[in-house]
Image (cartoon, coloured by chain):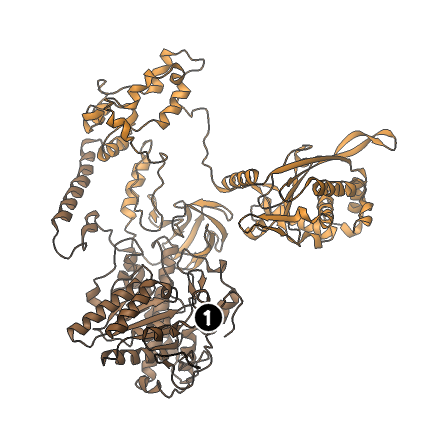
Chain colours: A orange, B brown
């Protein structure tokens, strides 16, 4: 727990590692608001880790002055989540880690490229994450060969292509770390001197303490300019030399983005996708919608093409159940679901979420409209409960709202099908033997070819199309 | 006892609310009908049932003594809750809660003499409390502050064994030593239902029986070996295994503190008088997670927890005290004050625990000086000292 530098009454509480070796957790729900007075050990939040949903007891008695993260946020272990004013509460003993924290704050205040924080790593927060990538093992072969110079000095001998600034920068990351001893590495890190920029004068090109201190004093004899700075003069470059990264923004991959990526990769490389398209005249559906909107029964209900598509999907699944199934690889079983838990892809402030409507097949059109309304509203507000995200069996993605016609959607992992509905456009279309301006939409259906053959996929898509082309055709289907 | 369908095998059946008639002791020999009866003196509603055999063993437990046992259980439940909170607050890396097992641990722990020696697993914090452990010493290991929490000889309890079941070997070996010493102390091994599947536990029982060692195998059958239900690894009650080794065994309601006290006293008396080992199966329930890193809702039926909450060890003793007119506000207030004070002491001790020095890792490796280790320590200290030079030379 960190004591604020400006106000000793304010105590920050950082997210601990609530399991063993966890790096992040999601704040599911806050039980307190800013301004609330809390007692020691009062439950202030529910937090979901990779292992469990746990209750967080307040570490202080006092007043909640700030909630740093909103409910629904995935927070890194060690990040502050709540601050307390402990003036009102009893004076608690300071955690023994506090002096270390103070030191690391001072270090952070300086302009150091990578402040080496000494953090107690045995209690609650796990070991500090090494920002410099994977620990690198020195190649035994290289040192055994008696190479007298560090890898940096050997670079100019590489092929001309490797000397281009961008490539050189890339190579530098994978280059072997110059040899030195841990105390010297710490000294260099504390002083902000990259070891790559030094030429070791010790035995076997070992970088010594003297080399680091000489670099600090600016003695040119032992400081070799970095490769990146060195090369532009040798090779004419169309753009002025810049530090790598100056024209790019790097965002850590985490949270929903990370989960989305993992889910998409898992889906794309386990389920063989097949995609079919169908373009249809949905004018009768649009007319039906206009009629329903004007009717008293649907007053106050938001009803859209998505509502009708959702209903059509439920009806079509009843006729083609294999679209509502799942491939259980470990069990070597195909799981056929009785309920249609209809997922709706939603763009939210947190990124792509696919909350689902449980047992959507049992809902009336109006019930479906209401469920869709509250589902998307909750998702956009970032308040979707984990339970609403789990257990989906089939999904719809409405790319039409972005003005897009068609695409090849990637399956939500574990599901057999996903339907993308395109934009409704006024287009010249064949109508009763003539060309007329009609409302036209393209449907794109991706399905898992392990579970669904072209026949079932096509029949399903044709059924949905039939309903949208003429909603009255439902009479022949149910 | 209502069982859900997830636990195969009759081993999980308890019949815990049926007060067993006569004696629950199982003598070596073929299993006989009634062998699985539970010894129960206080039922889950807090009604005291007379028992022909065990009443005599707890004849001295009067009202004030019952009140003391209740206070013990309230305090250890509070210790457990406070430590769980400390883990959630990032002050402990991990904590194994004992919630639900208070009666089994307090009842047995309070039966012991100070010169008896306890060899426990990591969940017996209530036993450690009975042994008089310094509260913050319980947390030391879980805070990552030390390799072990206390000097075993100060409270005659070995530091908790994390290796499942290994402590039964230590206890048996210690008990064999007691024979050699000609002493009448007893070694007590605490372990769980899961540990009974370990080779160590079975080997221990072979040796304990062969040497007629004064050791008690106190098995808390809390129904779950992390996520594995007891019925999977015990198709008959665990207590029935011991007679096969030639060790008498008894099944006791582990949520009945008085019954646990009684059967432990009986086993202690047997061991002190040269009668050899006893196996006690205390049928209880782990109401919390395996550790703070576990989520039991993923593998355990919520109804099962509800069933066991109705057999809560504290609630039934409170009901008994109430029926005896011993649960006045003055008493409960003082119990609460004691628990609050203990919790505050525990928290204070945890937060103010000094960080160990790097060289502490060399302590207690050998009981006598070791030149090989001294040399390593010397190297390590010089290595650490080389860091200290850097700031003086740099512009810090």
Query: Which residue is disc 1 drawn over?
Result: B12
Work out whether residue A164 or residue A145 is closer to the camera in this orientation and state it: A145
In the orientation shown, which residue stands out farthest toward the right? A433
Residue at image position (79%, 42%) is A290
Q: Position of residue A169 (x, y in %)?
A: 38, 23
Residue pictured at 76% horizontal, 50% vertical: A298
Q: For mark 1, name the chain.
A: B
- Of residue A463 and residue A214, the one placed in the foreground of this image is A463
Image point (45%, 24%), residue name: A247
Please provide percent x and percent y for residue B132: 25, 69
The answer to whether any part of residue B336 appears in the image is no
Residue at image location 27% in from the left, 55% down from the top: B352
Figure check: A155 above or below B148: above
Looking at the rendering, which quadrant does residue B33 occupy?
Answer: bottom left
Residue A240 appears in the figure: yes
Image position, residue A27 (x, y; %):
48, 50
Quadrant of the rendered structure where residue A436 is? top right
- Taking A223 as reference, is A30 left or right? right
Q: Few, some or many C-alpha atoms within 10 Å of disc 1 (few <14, some 14-19, many ≥20)?
A: many
Could you say where residue A157 lies in the image, as x and y percent from the top left?
A: 32, 16
């Amino acid at each position: 727990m960190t004591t604020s530098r400006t106000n000793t009454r304010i105590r920050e509480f950082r997210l601990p590692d609530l399991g063993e070796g966890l790096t992040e957790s999601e704040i599911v729900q806050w039980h307190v608001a800013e301004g609330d007075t809390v007692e020691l050990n009062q439950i202030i939040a529910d937090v979901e880790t990779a292992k469990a949903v746990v209750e967080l007891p307040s570490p202080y008695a006092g007043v909640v002055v700030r909630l740093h993260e909103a409910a629904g946020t995935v927070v890194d272990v060690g990040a502050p989540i709540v601050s307390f004013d402990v003036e009102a509460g009893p004076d608690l003993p300071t955690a023994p880690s506090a002096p270390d924290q103070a030191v690391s704050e001072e270090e952070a205040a300086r302009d150091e490229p990578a402040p080496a924080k000494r953090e107690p790593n045995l209690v609650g927060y796990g070991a500090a994450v090494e920002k410099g990538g994977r620990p690198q093992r020195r190649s035994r072969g290289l040192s055994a060969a008696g190479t007298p110079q560090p890898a940096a000095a050997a670079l100019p001998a590489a092929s001309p292509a490797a000397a281009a600034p961008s490539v050189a920068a890339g190579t530098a990351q994978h280059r072997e770390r110059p040899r030195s001893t841990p105390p010297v590495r710490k000294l260099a890190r504390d002083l902000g001197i990259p070891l790559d920029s030094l030429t070791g004068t010790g035995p076997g090109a070992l970088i010594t303490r003297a080399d680091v201190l000489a670099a600090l004093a600016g003695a040119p004899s032992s400081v070799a300019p970095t490769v990146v700075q060195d090369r532009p003069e040798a090779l004419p470059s169309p753009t002025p030399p810049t530090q790598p990264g100056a024209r790019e923004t790097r965002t850590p991959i985490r949270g929903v983005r990370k989960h989305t990526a993992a889910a998409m990769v898992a889906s794309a490389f386990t389920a063989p996708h097949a995609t079919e398209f169908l373009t249809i005249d949905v004018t009768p559906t649009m007319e039906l919608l206009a009629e329903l909107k004007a009717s008293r029964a649907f007053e106050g209900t938001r009803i859209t093409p998505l509502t009708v598509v959702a209903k059509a999907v439920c009806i079509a699944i009843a006729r083609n159940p294999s679209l509502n199934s799942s491939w259980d690889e470990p069990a070597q079983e195909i799981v056929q679901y009785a309920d249609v838990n209809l997922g709706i892809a939603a763009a939210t402030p947190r990124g792509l979420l696919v909350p689902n409507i449980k047992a959507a097949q049992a809902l009336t059109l109006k019930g479906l409209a209401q469920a869709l309304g509250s589902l998307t509203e909750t998702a956009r507000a970032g308040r979707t409960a984990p339970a609403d995200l789990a257990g989906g069996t089939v999904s719809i993605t409405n790319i039409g709202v972005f003005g897009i016609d068609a695409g090849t959607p990637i399956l939500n992992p574990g599901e057999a099908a996903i339907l993308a509905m395109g934009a409704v456009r006024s287009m010249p279309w064949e109508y009763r033997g003539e060309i007329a301006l009609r409302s036209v939409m393209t449907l794109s259906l991706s399905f898992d070819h392990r579970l669904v053959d072209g026949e079932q996929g096509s029949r399903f898509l044709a059924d949905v199309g039939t309903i949208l082309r003429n909603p009255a055709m439902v009479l022949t289907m149910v | 006892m209502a069982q859900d369908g997830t636990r195969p095998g009759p081993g999980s059946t308890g019949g815990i609310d049926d007060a067993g008639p006569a004696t629950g002791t199982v003598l070596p020999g073929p299993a006989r009908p009634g062998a699985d009866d539970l010894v129960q003196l206080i039922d889950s509603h807090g009604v005291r049932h007379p028992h022909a055999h065990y009443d005599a063993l707890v004849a001295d437990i009067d009202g004030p003594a019952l009140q003391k046992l209740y206070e013990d259980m309230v305090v250890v439940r509070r210790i457990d809750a406070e430590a769980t909170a400390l883990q959630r607050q990032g002050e402990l890396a991990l904590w194994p809660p004992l919630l639900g097992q208070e009666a089994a641990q307090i009842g047995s722990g309070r039966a012991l003499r100070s010169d008896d020696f306890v060899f426990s697993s990591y969940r017996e914090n209530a036993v450690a409390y009975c042994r008089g452990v310094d509260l913050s010493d319980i947390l030391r290991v879980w805070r990552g502050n030390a390799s072990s929490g206390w000097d075993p000889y100060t409270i005659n309890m070995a530091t908790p064994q994390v290796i499942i079941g290994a402590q039964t070997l230590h206890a048996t070996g210690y008990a064999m030593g007691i024979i050699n010493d000609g002493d009448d102390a007893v070694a007590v091994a605490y372990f769980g239902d899961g540990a009974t599947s370990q080779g160590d536990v079975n080997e221990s029982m072979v040796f304990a029986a062969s040497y007629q060692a004064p050791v008690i195998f106190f098995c808390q059958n809390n129904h779950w070996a992390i996520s594995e239900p007891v019925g999977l690894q015990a198709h008959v009650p665990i207590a029935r295994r011991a007679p096969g080794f030639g060790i008498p065994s008894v099944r006791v309601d582990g949520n009945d503190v008085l019954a646990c006290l009684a059967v432990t006293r009986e086993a202690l008396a047997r061991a002190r008088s040269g009668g050899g080992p006893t196996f006690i199966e205390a049928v209880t329930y782990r109401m919390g997670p395996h550790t703070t890193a576990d989520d039991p809702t993923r593998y355990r039926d919520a109804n099962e927890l509800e069933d066991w909450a109705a057999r809560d060890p504290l609630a039934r003793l409170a009901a008994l005290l109430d029926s005896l007119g011993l649960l006045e506000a003055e008493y409960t207030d003082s119990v609460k004050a004691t628990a609050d004070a203990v919790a505050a002491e525990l928290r204070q001790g945890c937060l103010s625990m000094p960080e160990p020095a790097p060289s502490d890792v060399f302590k207690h490796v050998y009981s006598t000086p070791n030149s090989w280790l001294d040399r390593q320590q010397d190297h390590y200290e010089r290595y650490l000292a080389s860091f200290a030079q850097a700031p003086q030379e740099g512009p810090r």
